[in-house]
Image (cartoon, coloured by chain):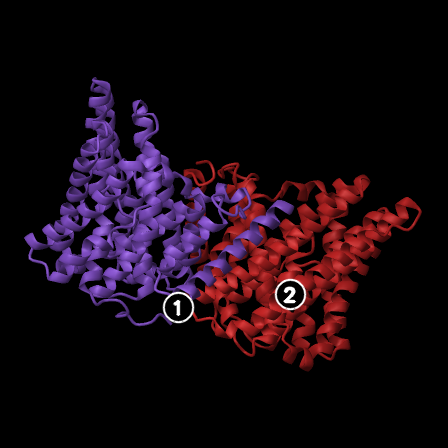
Amino acid sequence: MENLGIVITTLGVLLLLGLAGDLLARRIPVPRVTLLILFGVLIGPSALALLPVQAEAWYPLISNMALLMVGFLLGGKLSLANLREVGRLVLGISVFKVVGASLLVFLGLLAVGVPLPLALVMAGIAPASAPAAVTNVVEETRAEGRYTETMLGIVAIDDAWGLILFSLLLAVAQVLAAGGDGGALAALQYGGWEVGGALVLGLAVGIPAAYLTGRLNPGQPIQAEALGVVLLAGGLALWLEVSYLLTALVVGATVVNLASHHERPFHEIEHIEWPFMILFFLLAGASLHVAELAHLGWAGAAYIAMRAAGLILGAFVGGSVLGAEARIRRWMGLAVMPQAGVALGMALVAHNALPGLNGTILPLVVGSTVVFELVGPILTRWALERAGEAGKAPEAS
Amino acid sequence: MEHGGPGLILTLGGLLLLALAIEGLARRASVPQVTLLVLAGILIGKPGLDLLPSAADAWYPVVSDFALLIVGFLLGRHLSLALLRAHGRRLLWFSLSVVLGTSLTVGALLVASGFPVPMAMVLAGIAPASAPTAILNVVEENEAAGSYTETMLAVVAINNALVLITFDLLLAGAETLIAGEAMTGPLLAGGHGLVGAVLVGAVTGLPAGRLIHRVRSGESMQLATLGLVLACGGLALWIGASYLLAAIALGAVLVNSARGDDRPFETVQALDWPILALFFILTGAGSHPETLLSIGWLGGVYVVARALGLIVGAWTGGFLGRAPQIQRRWLGPAIMPQAGVALGMALVASEELPRWGETVLAVVVGSTVLFELVGPVLTRLGLSRAGNIRSPAGF
């Protein structure tokens, strides 16, 4: 019982801390995501070590639930009406930015003398973004408009491109590292399974869910349905080892396009996601290994600089090719800079798939996500302000 | 990955969808959803098909603590000074009479049937406990409102404190009888549990009451309220005080100091359903209906005496407090549900009195299945007879 007391007190205190972070963020020009992660770093093992040990055990559960909700909500942005308006831009810019970041990181790392397989893998990881952080900044700044829609669309689908590219590059890296092709085939299968399986599973759960949504009373039933469907899809995805973020995204996109009263389940999830997100960011901060920053070295600096340059350049070129307005071309690359869990997941896969690299991938990705996750949201917020869309949405009641 | 892994998330999702189906069924069948949720739990849990992963046992304490904290907080809301000033005497008569009446009836009938006195005393201490979660859920499900509903919820809140006191007194008495010398252990523990709970509730509630009007609605209010309830309950658990009582105290302090700011309660109400539904299903899944059959004569006497005690106690209390007929008649049946709180007491008793521990536990475990299934139906019936349900459930 004593254990449970500590656990529940900690949860309560973390939520109140989140409230404090939220209040503080209104007064200083720093996004609350950054503040929350900083708080997390501060109370985590890297600094004051105030969190009870059990907190580490909840992190997977909290982060899975938070990312599932984020995926579902992002999927909800992919309605056909929305896509008709910004679809071309979303598709075009996301492809360019993925390729841009990947290419520049690859070249940059080779230039500082990183071995070829490692450069390939890092090129695969570079385009991944952190949808949770980006959407949170949007909610916080109450941004709305064409730029915001495009940005949310991009972070929604760039995970799909990112995963495909990552599995391709990982396959090549494995061929180079091992000289055989058995591992490469496995890597390709891994990518195909992650992406393809997520699509199929998302549709399989999303279609009945959309059918159900139109037939339920608003309020509690919809809340239970939305949460139940998201968790069911996510649990199945984890079990089948397909990408659960993509699965949740496909479920959201299916529901938004097929269900009548389709806005209700998204409202319900938006309504309950916030406590999970607070805990997610705080615990994410607590699990960041700030000490890894010291080991980044040249490769790390090159990776960070090239990823940033690649995203900005890719978005700019993509926007120009598609004839997007200047504010979208100019500010999109900055806005999608945050990077966190997805990249770490990829790094773990690569770490296991390429034992020959002797654990050089993880410190690189872990260290750079500290930078991107702390600085990224600030850039996202700045970009939204530059694009003139912060504060355009009506205030939530 | 064990903790955040597929099994847990998948099961949570599945259970929520099951609860959703049951909610729809309950609307159509005009049966309280609590009853059906517990039944469904029995069906898919250990007593039935045994479909739940074994990890479900491990979450039960967490889910049940959350549920009781939330419900305690919402119950505390009904202890506003305005209500206490207007009906305080009546509420006190009701609570005293229900708790003492039920204890006396159960104790007397068990002793008269020839069961050992210490065992009868302990069961008499457990009998008046009711299940605040089930009762509150029936009220919310039917959107019941009115003076009968207010009275019932306030009585449930007060009862929880009274029951704690009588149980500790009776447990101390039973231990004294067995040992032949005065045993004050349970009294000290009880006093600690009670005083600690009120202290924790006040310490968290008073500053909150002063500050809460400054918190913005929406996300901030959600964080503030949830954080407050969890911090208060966690602290109580930590120092070994009654966390249910601490949450009730928090709600009561807040309703009286926040000057009509109802947003914290409304925020929690908007979120409570999934966790309560999970709690009811898991309650059913962890129950042991088979013990119902094995408790035999003893169980029969206990069940009859508890029902009788509640009804007679409420009637007498209503008579003494000059309550309207409808309250006298229906308050007893309405607080019939019994679950987690009683089980917690039975566990304490079984540790303190090893000789009768298993029997006491079996009686309570077996009878709560019955009370938790039938009780909500009576609660609902009382609400509808009192005219506190404006529209019939459904449509």
Q: Quadrant of residue B246?
A: bottom right
Q: Residue furthest bottom?
A: B86
The quarter in which the C terminus of chain B is drawn is bottom left
Q: Depth check: B388 or A151 in front?
A: A151
Q: Is B84 drawn above or below residue B310 in the view shown?
A: below
Q: Residue at x 50, y 75 (%)?
A: B213
B63 vs A116, left or right, is right
Would residue B107 be found to the left or right of residue A275 on screen?
right
Q: Which chain is purple?
A: A
In the image, which is nearer the foreground, mark 1 or mark 2? 1
**Which amino acid, by three-letter code, is at mark 2?**
Val
Q: Is residue A352 above or below residue B24?
A: above
Q: Is residue B219 left or right of residue B46?
A: left
Disc 2 marks which residue? B203
- Find residue A136 and report its image quarter: bottom left
* Residue topped by disc 1: A27
